[in-house]
Image (tube, grey):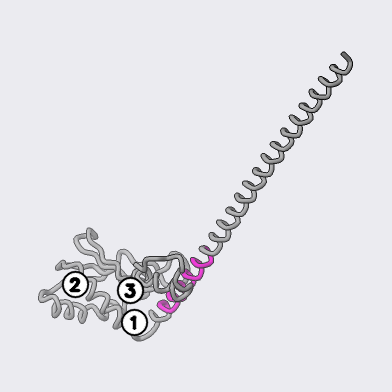
Amino acid sequence: IRAKAEEDFNILKQEEVEAERKRIRQEFERKEKQVEVEKKIALSNAINKNRLEVLKARDDAVNNILEKSREKIVEYSKTKNYKKLLRKLIVQGAIALEENKVAIKCRKEDEDIVNSVLDQAGKDVQERKGSAVELSVRTDSYLNPGGSGPNTCSGGVELTALNGAIRCDNTLDARLNLAFQGLLPEVRITLFERSKARKHLN
């Protein structure tokens, strides 16, 4: 009986030891998988953080070029060639609006220059359009003044017709933004080279 009892005890003890070993193995495997998942998550987060930092640095570089361009435009608005440019912008905008009466909005500091080119601009429009257009400079409202900062205007004009119902933004800032958006893909390629992962060029 004692031998049988000892044998049963040893078998039971062996089963318990094996069960505990199995439980420990399973717990170890579970923790090992958890560590592996955590490593993958940490690596993915690090890659994403790095990618975002690269994208931000690229955006900063592109925006820096835009700001440098804006600074050059501000300087250009102080040269003698600016008067001729203003006339061209007025003519282009008046033709684009296709109306008989056009109001011109400019910066306060450009008011005298705009008034000085108004007659010639009117003649240019009539010559190109084939009909006369009445051009007037607004004195009730002006574009933001020149300078640096978010609420400034680098120059140019804004033309409106039908009491402001239609508008042509021919400010230098609007023209720069339009040109810059068009050239943005080329600017990015020049600065950062073409992406090797990109399969399509357009």
Question: In the rendered structure, which disc, 3 or 1, sits on the residue that comes first in sequence?
Answer: 1
Other residues around mark 2 within 10 Å, as few (<14) / some (14–19) / many (≥20): some
Residue shown at the point (13%, 75%) measured from the top left: 129
Residue shown at the point (62%, 46%) measured from the top left: 37
Q: Is residue 195 above or below residue 10?
A: below
* Position of residue 86 in the picture relative to residue 4 (left or right): left
In the image, which residues are magenta? 56-74
Closer to us: 42 or 53: 42
| Cα distance in 3D space between marks 2 and 3 | 16 Å
Disc 1 is placed on an element classified as helix
Q: Indicate the quadrant where residue 181 lies.
A: bottom left
Question: According to the image, label 3 marks what residue?
Answer: 156
Question: What amino acid is labelled 2 in the image?
Answer: Ile
* Position of residue 171 in the picture relative to residue 16 (left or right): left
Farthest-out residue, right: 2
| Dominant secondary structure of the residues highlighted in magenta in the image | helix
| Cα distance in 3D space between marks 2 and 1 | 20 Å
Question: According to the image, label 2 marks what residue?
Answer: 95
Question: In the rendered structure, which disc, 2 or 3, sits on the residue that comes first in sequence?
Answer: 2
Q: Is residue 137 above or below residue 76?
A: above
Do callouts 2 and 1 mark residues in contact (Cβ within 8 Å)? Answer: no
Question: What amino acid is labelled 3 in the image?
Answer: Gly
Question: According to the image, label 1 marks what residue?
Answer: 82
59 is within the stretch colored magenta: yes
